[in-house]
């Protein structure tokens, strides 16, 4: 793994960093194809929004871009993780007047996924762990992710690709690492994220693609049953692009034409790595 | 600052540690008096509860105790922070099958507080930041503390000692770094912590002292106004012991006899550092 901290090759961080102590950080997970980070501008904008909400200083974009270029040198495809921490200092929860934020850029291989996940769809479960409702932090990719960690710890079976998470009122919000869309009467629906959840970059891309194709997209808050009664479901994130959902807890879903169209558009337009980029895991 | 990581003197941690990446950690803040960590057993029990909920392995208590002794060698008073991280490894939110937890023990000086905070009481504000309701994590001192960090960032004025936090329904829960008790008709009330908040060690001590003194203690969930209408209020944590509240957002409170009794019992019985241990800050 290549890792740059504040522009220097490094693998360790002060144990006093507030990311380590309190999860006082924001991050982005950026897909890399042919050496280029995809959707840089969208990731950058979400990072800035997160830093603003967390009241942390925004790094220089050109500097971050140059550091990303350095990390990605001689790389074809992978995942670039950008973590901006609040740095060390301050007593207890109180930050120092001028936080010494740390920029951590690390490059990781694309995860191992068999191509069937794109072509046949994925098997999904519903997690017991629910998402607390915190409007101030909703939508951000911040460093407090224990809910996702605990949800992901609920299953081991490799045939289950993702777990769905509801909020504490039972409204469906997202997957542990993906956003979800439902197809109903030819239109798209996706959970409202004003109370919790991560507003994913690929979610935004899909919403724009749909609008371009004159497909209506509704953001709404509704209980799990509403979503499970949809005609079809798919998951998305920046790394995987679009995965059709084949099964949720034993309930089968068809591979519908709109999902296939969006999945293929994402790959054809180079908006996500193609399935061929991912190493397949043995079943 | 003295710091031991897994028993070795160290100041840095792998940047890949899941505490840094996701706040995947639990911690304890232990007061040290005459070289001894106070309430070791209570802190240890909460740490074990937190590790159980987070599904992380529990370290050997004798080992942790020995490492604490080493960190505290030749120290009179201070604050011992014990942070147990989930360690590095795993792809995304998924932990490795056997987490390589890291034990980070660090020693800090007691914070600077003027003695008036104990004798005359403290000025307190009500924070705008609210606490999300997550029953699974409620009561634990886990590593996802952005809500407290953002609440503490709401004020700079040194004369304000603490900020009170309500949950997203407006029920009062705690201070950013302390628990709160109200005195009403000679009895004690303290917020219920089954939905959010940290179940503090000193809160537990106070509840036992009160019961020993035949003072009734009610845990209840109620809106901010209910608490502000109490006869008197006090804050507590392991480090400060008991601080009477003199003022909440301009509303004055008397220094009542029960608060003074509990504050003095805590010091006389050696259940917290005495005010004289704290260095005073210039006004």
Image (cartoon, coloured by chain):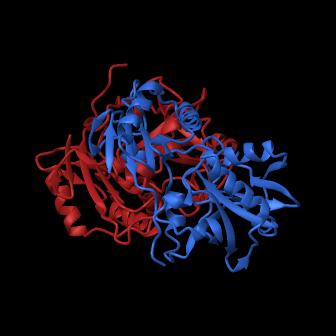
Chain colours: A blue, B red
Closer-to-camera residue (A76/B2): A76
| Number of numbered callouts drawn | 0
Residue found 39% across the figure and 55% down from its top: B18
Residue found 55% across the figure and 45% down from its top: A141
Residue A129 location (% of width, % of height): 59, 66
Closer-to-camera residue (A138/B16): B16
Location of residue A211 (image quadrant): top right
Instruction: Tell me the quadrant of the picture where the C terminus of chain B can be found.
Output: top left
Location of residue A52 (image quadrant): top right
The answer to whether residue A62 is visible is yes
In the picture, measured across the screen, residue B217 lies left or right of residue A17, that is right
In the picture, measured across the screen, residue B3 lies left or right of residue A268, that is left
Residue found 15% across the figure and 45% down from its top: B75
Q: Quick check: A6 above or below B36?
A: above
Residue B234 location (% of width, % of height): 50, 43
Can you name the residue that lies furthest to the right here?
A185
The answer to whether residue B241 is visible is no
Can you name the residue that lies furthest to the left here?
B74
Can you name the residue that lies furthest to the top here?
B283
Residue B251 location (% of width, % of height): 62, 29
Q: Quick check: A155 above or below A88?
A: below
Location of residue A18 (image quadrant): top left
Residue A123 location (% of width, % of height): 63, 73
Instruction: Tell me the quadrant of the picture where the N terminus of chain B can be found.
Output: top left
In the picture, measured across the screen, residue B6 lies left or right of residue B52, that is left
Closer-to-camera residue (B214/A70): A70
């Amino acid at each position: 793994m290549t890792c740059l901290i504040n522009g220097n090759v490094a693998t360790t961080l002060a144990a006093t960093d507030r990311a380590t102590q309190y999860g006082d950080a924001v991050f982005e997970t950026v897909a890399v194809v042919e050496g280029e980070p995809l959707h840089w501008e969208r990731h950058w904008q979400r990072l800035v929004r997160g830093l603003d909400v967390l009241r942390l200083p925004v790094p220089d974009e050109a500097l971050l871009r140059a550091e990303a270029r350095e990390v990605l040198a001689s790389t074809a495809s992978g995942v670039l993780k950008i973590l901006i921490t609040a740095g060390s200092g301050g007593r207890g929860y109180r930050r120092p007047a001028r936080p010494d934020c740390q920029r951590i850029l690390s490059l990781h291989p694309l995860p191992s996924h068999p191509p069937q996940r794109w072509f046949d769809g994925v098997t999904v479960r519903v997690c017991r762990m629910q998402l607390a409702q915190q409007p101030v932090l909703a939508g951000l990719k911040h460093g407090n992710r224990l809910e996702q960690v605990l949800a992901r710890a609920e299953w081991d079976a490799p045939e289950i690709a993702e777990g769905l998470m509801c909020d504490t009122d039972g409204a469906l919000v997202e997957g542990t690492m993906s956003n979800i869309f439902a197809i109903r009467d030819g239109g798209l629906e996706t959970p409202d994220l004003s109370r919790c959840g991560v507003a994913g970059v690929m979610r935004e891309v899909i919403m724009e693609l749909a609008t371009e194709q004159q497909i209506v997209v509704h953001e709404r808050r509704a209980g799990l049953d509403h979503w499970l009664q949809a005609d079809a479901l798919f998951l998305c994130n920046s790394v995987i692009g679009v995965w059709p959902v084949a099964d949720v807890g034993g309930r089968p879903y068809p591979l519908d034409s709109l999902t296939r169209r969006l999945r293929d558009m994402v790959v054809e337009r180079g908006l996500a790595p193609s399935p061929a980029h991912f190493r397949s895991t043995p079943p």
